[in-house]
Amino acid sequence: MPSYTAPTRDMQFVLDEVLDIRNSDVPGYSELEPDFTSAILEEAGKLARDVLAPLNQVGDQEGCHMENGVVRTPKGFREAFEAIKEGGWNGLDLPEEFGGQNLPYIIGTAVGEIFVSANMAFNMYQGLTHGAISTILAHGTEDQKKTFVPKMISLDWTGTMNLTEPHCGTDLGLLRTKAEPQPDGSYKITGQKIFISSGEHDMAENIVHLVLAKAPGGGPGTKGISLFIVPKFLVNPDGSLGERNAVSVGKIEEKMGIHGNSTCVMNYDGATGYLLGELHKGMRAMFTMMNEARIGVGLQGYAVAEAAYQNAVAYAKDRLQGRAVTGASNPEGPADPLIVHPDVRRALMDQKSFVEGARAFTFWGATLIDRAHRNNDATAMGLISLMTPVIKGFLTDKGFESTVLAQQIYGGHGYIEEWGMSQFVRDARITMIYEGANGIQALDLVGRKLAQDGGKHVMAFFEMVKSFIKENEGEERLRADFLDPLKAASKDLQSAAMFFMQNGMKNPNEALAGSYDFMHLFGHVCLGLMWAQSARAALKALDAGAEDKRFYEAKLATGRYYMARQLPMTATHLARIQSGAAPVMALEPDAF
Amino acid sequence: MPSYTAPTRDMQFVLDEVLDIRNSDVPGYSELEPDFTSAILEEAGKLARDVLAPLNQVGDQEGCHMENGVVRTPKGFREAFEAIKEGGWNGLDLPEEFGGQNLPYIIGTAVGEIFVSANMAFNMYQGLTHGAISTILAHGTEDQKKTFVPKMISLDWTGTMNLTEPHCGTDLGLLRTKAEPQPDGSYKITGQKIFISSGEHDMAENIVHLVLAKAPGGGPGTKGISLFIVPKFLVNPDGSLGERNAVSVGKIEEKMGIHGNSTCVMNYDGATGYLLGELHKGMRAMFTMMNEARIGVGLQGYAVAEAAYQNAVAYAKDRLQGRAVTGASNPEGPADPLIVHPDVRRALMDQKSFVEGARAFTFWGATLIDRAHRNNDATAMGLISLMTPVIKGFLTDKGFESTVLAQQIYGGHGYIEEWGMSQFVRDARITMIYEGANGIQALDLVGRKLAQDGGKHVMAFFEMVKSFIKENEGEERLRADFLDPLKAASKDLQSAAMFFMQNGMKNPNEALAGSYDFMHLFGHVCLGLMWAQSARAALKALDAGAEDKRFYEAKLATGRYYMARQLPMTATHLARIQSGAAPVMALEPDAF
């Protein structure tokens, strides 16, 4: 069975040294002393290692089952959920007023990584609840907040998001679920929703569904859409549970992975719903949840890769097979461990350099969110809005690839379910699809975010890279290994953006045909920047005579690997982008 | 449920126009008139579409089960196997003397692609039998050939290959299965083998296991290994089945995919075995099977991708979602089909250009095998020996990626098992692992094949590329789109080989750290060459006023896509290779 240990040392390095959060002006950050954050991370790590990780394979193999309309989660999930509740983990970064602890979002992010690595399918019950809470907090009435949020923070109730219908996913303008206004101000919701994660289960007293539906008078397409709160059990004025609402599970989907999470078809048959936010402005409200969820999915991408990587390392050290070509490393044994072989090293370094870079990138994104919310910083808001599709799309594509590399190290044993490596691959696969398939992320990035506010957010990013390079030019130890490659990669990104500007106006397909490559190009530059920053922090620690020298030296070596072996991809992405729309669009549909 | 139609038009194009097999001097090729080959391919296509493809998802969902030591294949498999037997499909390219039809290997390859696309797991029962037959034909005594081969060609008996043991896969020198010589010249085989595809099932009267084991006196490591024939039922002198041999199934493995094939743990408890080939030369004999199997696995890689691609195209044309940014293509409908979107096109073109290029590459490889066997052509033998790891490693990595792209087009529906796209991904995944994990292919290529016979095979390949470019330089329509990119890619490959020569002598890790990238670089150059040759053939047909102009124009457009969008990867692979061993090997094992 795979095991998992929270990478708290690396998390602390990112928090304290790369991002230096203590010395930031974000309200609440000055309290994030290493002793304090490390106590939280260690505690989360313990729960992850001892309770959540051991249930990961159980959840995969047993799955969720429907018995007389009730969904049963896998053995042990209820108890684990109780442990999460008791620890108050769900409210970590939510308002004290409703029972949360009001810590910054970045702490929730770090803890989230730990829980996802240990058991992604399980963590979704909590994760979606968190997103639903944020949406109610952002758009709900005072009454709605008081009624729903405390119970959801405590996880007595959980939340879901209901967008997709059988005939529409991305194109929500097509949705058919109807909301009919009732004399008492509520609505009757009727329609079918599919792919509803955590749609029904046996771990909470109530489930609060946030449902997109069309109320009369809203006009065609997405303009007519509103968002509704549809609880499984209606809530009495005193907060106690009332009658069962007319919402039921059609079936549980058979999926490729995340079997521990109940993905449901939900049928709404005139269910009572309450408008959340403004009428016919449902898309805007839903995007509160969506943007949070997208960053959360990017996090899932690398968090599952971290878990897979840890197990691949263990196997590569343990499994004896072949001899090092440069001389036996284990001459007493029948063979050397896999890790002596250069190609196994390559696969491990690919994973390690991705996961650590992705962690720094995501944590940095979390600081932007904190800055946007706590400092009302429009620049940070613009930057995270630009970065959201990159975090989601790039980290999930690469995260999936990384799990495939981890599985590969096991050879035939990786293909056998017994070892658990297949599960990481199958679980990670969904992250490229849900909360907007990655092609949609690329479209969002190139079609919307790039030119947003006159393109100033991407200019801010370029400026950031430029000034980092300038500030550190004097550092010989950074120049050739980090700054030069970063400069080249950033130049590729600028050339790509320029190509879009010059050609996309005349023909938008010229930009859209390169959108996916642009998302990846952007992701590489972001990770390159993170590695350059990490290298600077490592050098600083070494210069200051840090005790665990080996950690910092490994950090530098891993960064050098990323810059030398991964960053060159930007040139290929640029070449593809610059080949334009013609090769992509040449064929008529019936020539396929 | 996914469907499948054999791409016979494209196969004929490769056979008749790209490879021009009729005009080759390989014995038997002159008879391969288009009418003749097309009759075979159409017939195979019918069987694939009507019988095999409908059982693909059944096999995945039902899997194989053990009942009282007997393995039951999924519903319908027995009947389908009867149809394969009745059609004589297994003997297509095997000697007439033993009941085969003696057609060239290339015909077996084309038919193999069709069957694998339709149902990979099912086709393995037959495919492994074919490999076992080749091994017996190459190394067996006359008596062994007469006893086993006719029954195996008719598929009354099937075959397996038994290499892996729990503690050793790649490193066969570690194997523990023992062969004790008996007074009658037979051996008693004792040991456990794992991951044995088609190890036990209910579709044949007998199963002929080819088993690697150590007989006394052979010395340590792989030198001590011999190959044995161990039939499930012993065979009486008159050819009838005798007593049950002491070989049994330990269990059926739970795998990520190819559930329709029974992957077994096999226990040999003093089972009677017969030496196949020379004593202590078992590795050499096994490599007959292995090399054939490796090309077969490369074929699986792109064949599954072809099936996934066909379904992705159908879905992209059918599913209405969003509007073309350049103006509605389906203004009467609620939305446009997915195929209007540039990023969906990109994903489809990636798949199409890969699969068609891979087909040409594999078919070309098959002509090398025919030439090697039928003309005793040492150059062809050297070239296919060099190409085998590229066909296996590159086509399976890219084939897997291609199935992931196909699945992605389905959005959430791709993740649900109901639609069958997940199965293509899960099935394709094994091709990167078995018959030598792809890292081993890269090692074989760089560590062995590249320098084989003084490097003359790779020189022959470079010469081939060079003379193709030279011959066609006058063709304006090829130059910019095909010849220039091919020249650049081939130059990258030469630079990489040069880097290995200059640095690998001093430190073999300098070569091995780049081996995986080299395998991919090589694969891209091969597909680039295939596309350039295909383009030339398409232009020739168009110039001759071919009727189905649209086929040839699509061929040219697809080739241009590959050259513009895929071939630039060679530069990145070269950059990685030239960064050398240092970034890869910098960390001590305990720093991971």
Image: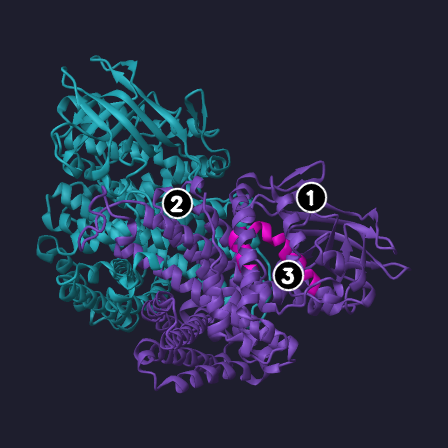
Chain colours: A purple, B cyan
Query: Along the line of sight, which residue is nearer the eye, A367 or B248?
Result: A367
Determine which residue is flagged by label 3.
Answer: B333
Labels 1 and 3 share a subunit: no
| Residue underneath mark 1 | A202
Secondary-structure class at tag 1: loop
Q: Rounded to the nearest whole Å, what is the CA distance between mark 2 and mark 1? A: 32 Å
Question: In the rendered structure, are the residues bearing label 2 and label 3 in contact, judged by CB atoms less than 8 Å apart?
Answer: no
What type of secondary structure mainly makes up the magenta span? helix
Foreground pick, B19 / B439: B439
- Mark 3 belongs to chain: B
Reply yes or no: does residue A366 show up in magenta: no
Chain letter of the residue beneath label 2 in the structure image: A
Which residue was labeled with disc 2?
A414
B277 relative position to A509: left or right: left
Distance from disc 2 to disc 3, alpha carbons, whole Å, reads: 46 Å
What residue type is disc 2 on? Gly
Q: Residue at x 13, y 58 (%)?
A: B460
Would you say A200 lies left or right of A36 here? Answer: right
User: What kind of residue is marked 1?
Assistant: Asp
Residue found 57% across the figure and 64% down from its top: A109
Q: Residue A293, relative to residue A84: is it above or below?
A: below
In this rendering, the answer to whether A572 lies above or below A453 is above
User: Could you say which quadrant of the image residue B171 lies in?
Assistant: top left
Magenta part of the protein: which range? A112-134
The vertical placement of B203 against B579, above or below, is above
Label 3 neighbour load within 10 Å: few <14, some 14-19, many 20+: few
Q: Is residue B561 left or right of residue A217?
A: left
